[in-house]
Amino acid sequence: MAKGMNVSEGTVSKVVKRMLNMHLCKLQKRHGLNYAQKKARVKKCGRLQDCAANGEHLRMLFMTEKLFTVEQSYNSQNVRVFARTSDAAKEAERTVSRSVRTASVMVWAGMSATGRTPLIFVEKGAKINTVFYLEEVLKKELLPWSREHFKVFKVGTQV
């Protein structure tokens, strides 16, 4: 843009920042949703609003799971070793090992307006499918917690 107007890049930058009050922003990542998915989300949001209007949101339990990898974090721009030579750096543990199958742990958690569930850790190598999820997570852990926590417990499906 600066070359086309025959001015310096610094001048264009100053005009954009000071006079137009604009800033550089990174592009944001979003889910690529098609029309049917957008329509389904609008429908779910409407049901959530209805639940909130009736006060049911106070007894609603939101759950999520996350797979954590247990591996040393590494960023080549930020992790440096001071050394006079490359050989000296190797002696100073300059290498970071990577493996294809890293150690990991799956954690489930739930949260409501009035409290949070205890964390549920899944053993390494467990086959996570519908049966495992129903028996090990919902029936053994979350159902007893929900009955104790909410007193009046109503089982429902995802909104």
Image (tube, helix red, strand yellow):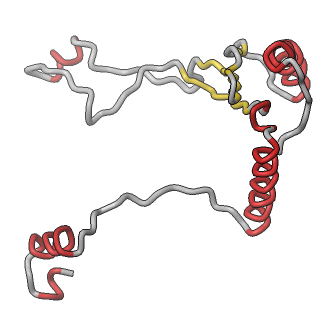
> Seen in the image, is 93 located left or right of residue 150?
left
**The C terminus, quarter of image:** top right
Tell me the residue at 76%/51% (across/down).
Answer: 49
In the orientation shown, which residue stands out farthest toward the front?
54
The percent coordinates of residue 94 (x first, y second) are 27, 19
Residue 109 left/right relative to 74: right
Percent position of residue 34, x then y: 72, 66
Q: Residue at x 91, y 24 (%)?
A: 131
Query: For residue 26, which quarter of the picture?
Result: bottom left
Q: Is residue 95 left or right of residue 104?
A: left
The quadrant the N terminus occupies is: bottom left
- Which is more toward the observer, 81 or 28? 28
Q: Residue at x 82, y 19 (%)?
A: 146
> In the rendered view, would you say 29 is above or below 11?
above
Residue at the far bottom: name it. 5
Residue 42 drawn at (x, y percent): 75, 60
Q: Residue at (10%, 87%) from the top-left corner?
A: 6
In this view, the residue in front, 121 or 146, is 146
Q: Is residue 3 above or below residue 66?
A: below
Please tell me whether residue 16 is drawn above or below residue 108 in the rendered image.
below
Q: Position of residue 98 (x, y in %)?
A: 46, 24
